[in-house]
Image: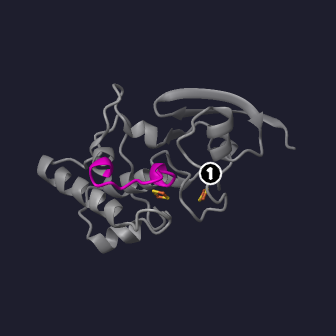
Amino acid sequence: MSANLTVTLTVNGREIARTAGGHLTLLRWLRDVAGVTDPKYGCGEGICGSCTVLVDEVQVSSCLVLAAQVDGATVTTAAGLTGPDGTLNPLQQAFHKHHAAQCGFCTPGMLMAAAAMLADGRTRTRAEIRQGLHGNLCRCTGYGPIVDAIEATQLGARQHGSHGLGTGQPGARQQGAGW
Ligand code: FES
Ligand code: FES
């Protein structure tokens, strides 16, 4: 057991400071210490993507990073895509419309991977969308509805001249493979 450390993060616009074991991953810190439970624990090894969040707008598997390593950062989870009044953003609405979630366990990570992709405003082919999701596993949907939802979001964004996120949080920024 490592010494306790105080970590302060701004999570979905809310500053949270907690003192906990310095060995805790960001995922455990969020879920078990801060009560932010939308990032999910799937594999704990960086394989499934269910724990995906944005740290200072960069896509991260939160099971692979210590909370203490990102002290002071801004973290966005899937809940942070929702507007302050609870309105789903266009990406979330598209997931709903296209039935891109079944059991929903992968969905918070899928949404964040998709948000990271869409943030640069570039229109991707379906193959590129699938490539962008390569670090996020889903055992239910066959991926087709998820790709449909992301494709529809980028089409809507083109029509409205935005990146299609419409979040209360800063947009994500593409940072290379693994998003
Ligand atoms: S729980 Fe982090 S990648 Fe699977
Ligand atoms: S909807 Fe069940 S794992 Fe993706």
Which residue shows up at 31% across the image and 55% down it?
118
Magenta stretch: helix, strand or loop mostly: loop
Which residue shows up at 32% across the image and 37% down it?
88
Q: Hey, which residue is sitting farthest right in the picture?
A: 1
Which residue shows up at 41% across the image and 63% down it?
141
Color scheme of the displayed model: one colour
Residue 151 location in percent, x, y? Answer: 25, 61
Q: Is mark 1 within 8 Å of ligand 1?
A: yes
Q: Which residues are magenta?
A: 95-108
| Disc 1 packing (10 Å; few <14; some 14–19; many ≥20) | many
Residue 165 location in percent, x, y? Answer: 30, 45
Instruction: Tell whether 19 sits left or right of 114.
Output: right
Q: Give the number of marks.
A: 1
Determine the image quadrant of residue 78. Answer: top left
Classify mark 1: helix, strand or loop. Answer: loop
**Vertical placement of residue 150 versus 127, above or below:** above
Question: Can residue 165 be found in the magenta stretch?
Answer: no
> Which of the pair 56/152 is nearer the observer?
152
**Residue 173 appears anywhere in the view:** no
**Residue 76 appears anywhere in the view:** yes
> Which of the pair 79/12 is nearer the observer?
79
Residue 109 location in percent, x, y? Answer: 48, 53
Instruction: Give the amino acid type for the residue marked by disc 1 in the picture.
Output: Tyr
Residue 23 location in percent, x, y? Answer: 77, 46
Which residue shows up at 53% across the image and 32% down it?
10
Instruction: Tell whether 119 sits left or right of 74.
Output: left
Q: Hey, which residue is sitting farthest bottom in the picture?
A: 127
Instruction: Tell whether 143 sits left or right of 24.
Output: left
**Image quadrant containing the N terminus:** top right
Residue beneath disc 1:
41
